[in-house]
Amino acid sequence: MERCHVKTTEALFYVCLQLPDHVPSWYSLWIKPDQILTNDMEEDYNKSTGNTLLVGIPSTHIPTVDIGLVGSKFYKFLPQKNSPAFSRLYFGNNFSFKARHMMLARNINAVAGSLDGKIYVMGGCSANESTSWAEVFDTTTQVWESLPDPGPELRSSSIKALIVTKGKVYVERSSEDKYFFYDPILGRWGVAENRPAVEMRCVIEDVVYSCDRFGCFWYDTKHNQWMVVHGLEVFNRNRRGGIIALANYCGKLLILWDRPGPGQNKNIWCSVIALERRDEVVWGHVEWTSVVLTVPSSYRFLRCKVKSG
């Protein structure tokens, strides 16, 4: 069976998880060489077969933080793990250009996002760092500035992501009980009553896909409406639990979700679905599904990334 060679540099899928009483850690998807992968949901397995696993990776292999296209340039930054060096932004088609240093070093727990030509970077430093816990980089003037102190509650939180919407920068925490946001116009912090409405989506070959507890969907730009992905009826019926991530994995749809496992644990499941568009219909075929990691029920999913080589 043709599959993405994660054991090479073709593509690597990373997830960042926080286990109870641990700092956030990164894992990568490992596939046992020369295996024909199967749909383990059909066998009702409740544990990993060992053919596909999320394995912890050393700090020397942590992925960069991709920011995306800002203006006409792509930006990313490389966290500095246990290093006194200041973190830097990199930009350009091959990321060979370096922007000015940030005001302080940031580790793998930092998050970033962009709004109106400015790049916001938060966290990844000591919770006692009140002066520059959050800073912003103006891509036009190439100058860093510190944002106001958001307060100890946010500084001591585990941060999942920055959500940029409606002219504000929202900070999504792992606890998900309160949503802080920064208003660039007013230059101050606030607290939102509800999570900003941002759906879990990914783009594969210029088509937007989304999944929820009812199924998988694609957005038909010709008719401006969401359409169901056909061929996944059994998969949708058997998939119980909450979806935690979607990703474009070598042109295929990767779905990560969790559901109760043995004892006080949860199983994290992974599926890779091949997609085929036939005229006005998109069909999905489940290539493999398996438990990739068993974690305590109180774990937190923070973020994921696919790195292509």
Image: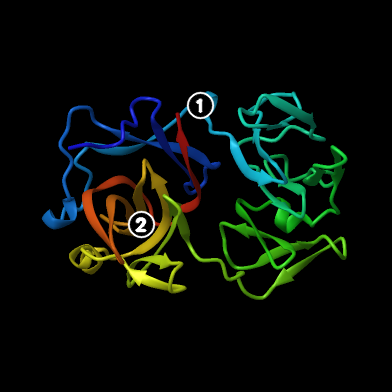
Residue found 13% across the figure and 57% down from its top: 42
Which of the 4 quarters of the picture holds residue 195? bottom right
- x%, y% of residue 116? 77, 55
Task: Inspect the image, locate mark 2, and give the three-letter code of the amino acid beneath it.
Answer: Trp
Q: Which residue is mark 1?
A: 61
- Report the front residue among 91 and 256: 91
- x%, y% of residue 89? 71, 33
**Numbered badge on residue 269:** none
- Which callout, 1 or 2, points at the residue further toward the start of the chain? 1
Q: Which residue is mark 2?
A: 257
Residue found 66% across the figure and 66% down from its top: 179
- x%, y% of residue 221? 46, 67
297 lies left or right of 61: left
**The C terminus, quarter of image:** top left
- Report the front residue among 11 and 258: 11
Residue found 74% across the figure and 27% down from its top: 98
Q: Is residue 303 above or below residue 85?
A: below
Q: Secondary structure at mark 2?
A: strand
Classify mark 1: residues with Cα within 10 Å, few (<14), some (14-19) or many (20+): few
Q: Is residue 235 above or below residue 287?
A: below
Task: Inspect the image, locate mark 1, and give the three-letter code of the amino acid beneath it.
Answer: His
23 lies left or right of 247: right
Q: Is residue 115 above or below residue 136?
A: below
Which of the 4 quarters of the picture holds residue 4? top left
Residue found 71% across the figure and 26% down from its top: 97
